[in-house]
Image (cartoon, rainbow, N blue to C red):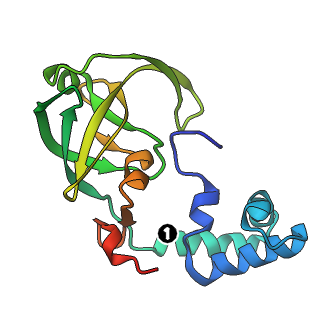
């Protein structure tokens, strides 16, 4: 599932408390290494090969977790004409690598496509999308990133590239983004 525009089981495994830590430790022991990246595929293998009771417990934990959708205000800016911007609400999608914005919004800002790229959807279909570059301002921080043009009936999506470049964390239980200042070294 690497490179797909959907959350992977591997990402889920890493975020579910003590059980995830235990699984990571088991994967490292099984793989014979204490380097976290060496154990990623082994983690997934251990979970898929787990006893039915363990799998059921995992599914129950995932279903019971209080998770909501995170939506945030974003200012989208034409990087070549900063006076041209649009402010709207974006759905935060940690499974989407890049951000997606409706075509008419991009056109209203004067942002033209600079190329096309293939995108893998959650249902394993590959489609070709127009791409460009835009400024994203979230929580008073700005960065520039690749943006995909999507149909006008698609909700704007804020992808991982922007979140990571701005150092923002997702708090799905409270349905918000957290600025880097809440994280201590």
Give the residue pinned by disc 1.
Answer: 63
Residue occupying the point 60% across, 68% down: 14
User: Where on the picture, by quarter, is residue 155?
Assistant: top left
**Relative horizontal placement of residue 54, taking residue 116 as reference (left or right):** right
Nearest the viewer among 94 and 153 is 94
**Relative horizontal placement of residue 113, taking residue 185 as reference (left or right):** left
User: Where on the picture, by quarter, is residue 71?
Assistant: bottom left
- Does residue 131 lie above or below 93 as drawn? above
**Relative horizontal placement of residue 84, taking residue 79 as reference (left or right):** left
Please indicate, yes or no, whether residue 155 appears anywhere in the rendered image: no
Please tell me whether mark 1 sits on a helix, a strand or a loop.
helix
* Residue 43 position within the rendered picture, expressed as x and y whole percent measured from the top left: 75, 65
Residue occupying the point 27% across, 16% down: 112
What crowding class fits label 1: few (fewer than 14 Cα within 10 Å), some (14-19), or many (20 or more)? few
Nearest the viewer among 17 and 86 is 86
Please indicate, yes or no, whether residue 16 appears anywhere in the rendered image: yes
Residue, far left: 83
Q: Quadrant of the N terminus?
A: top right
Residue, far bottom: 18
User: Where on the picture, by quarter, is residue 86?
Assistant: top left
* Residue 147 position within the rendered picture, expressed as x and y whole percent measured from the top left: 36, 32
Residue occupying the point 63% across, 72% down: 58
**Relative horizontal placement of residue 118, taking residue 140 as reference (left or right):** right
* Residue 51 position within the rendered picture, expressed as x and y whole percent measured from the top left: 80, 72
* Residue 9 position within the rendered picture, expressed as x and y whole percent measured from the top left: 62, 57
Residue occupying the point 29% across, 49% down: 91
How many marks overall? 1
- Does residue 19 lie above or below 33 as drawn? below
């Amino acid at each position: 599932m690497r490179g797909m525009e959907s959350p992977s089981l591997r990402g889920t495994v890493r975020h579910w408390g003590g059980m995830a830590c235990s699984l990571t430790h088991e994967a490292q022991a099984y793989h014979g290494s204490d380097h976290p990246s060496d154990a990623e595929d082994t983690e997934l293998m251990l979970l898929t090969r787990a006893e039915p009771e363990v799998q059921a417990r995992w599914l129950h934990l995932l279903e019971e977790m209080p998770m909501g959708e995170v939506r945030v205000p974003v200012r989208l800016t034409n990087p070549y004409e900063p006076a041209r911007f649009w402010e709207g609400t974006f759905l935060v999608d940690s499974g989407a690598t890049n951000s997606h914005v409706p075509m008419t919004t991009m056109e209203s800002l004067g942002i033209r496509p600079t190329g096309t790229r293939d995108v893998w959807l959650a249902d394993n279909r590959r489609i070709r999308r127009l791409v460009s570059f835009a400024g994203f301002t979230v929580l008073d921080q700005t960065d520039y990133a690749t943006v995909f043009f999507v149909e006008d009936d698609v909700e704007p999506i804020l992808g991982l590239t922007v979140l990571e470049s701005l150092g923002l964390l997702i708090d799905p239980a409270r349905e918000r983004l957290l600025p880097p200042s809440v994280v201590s070294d």
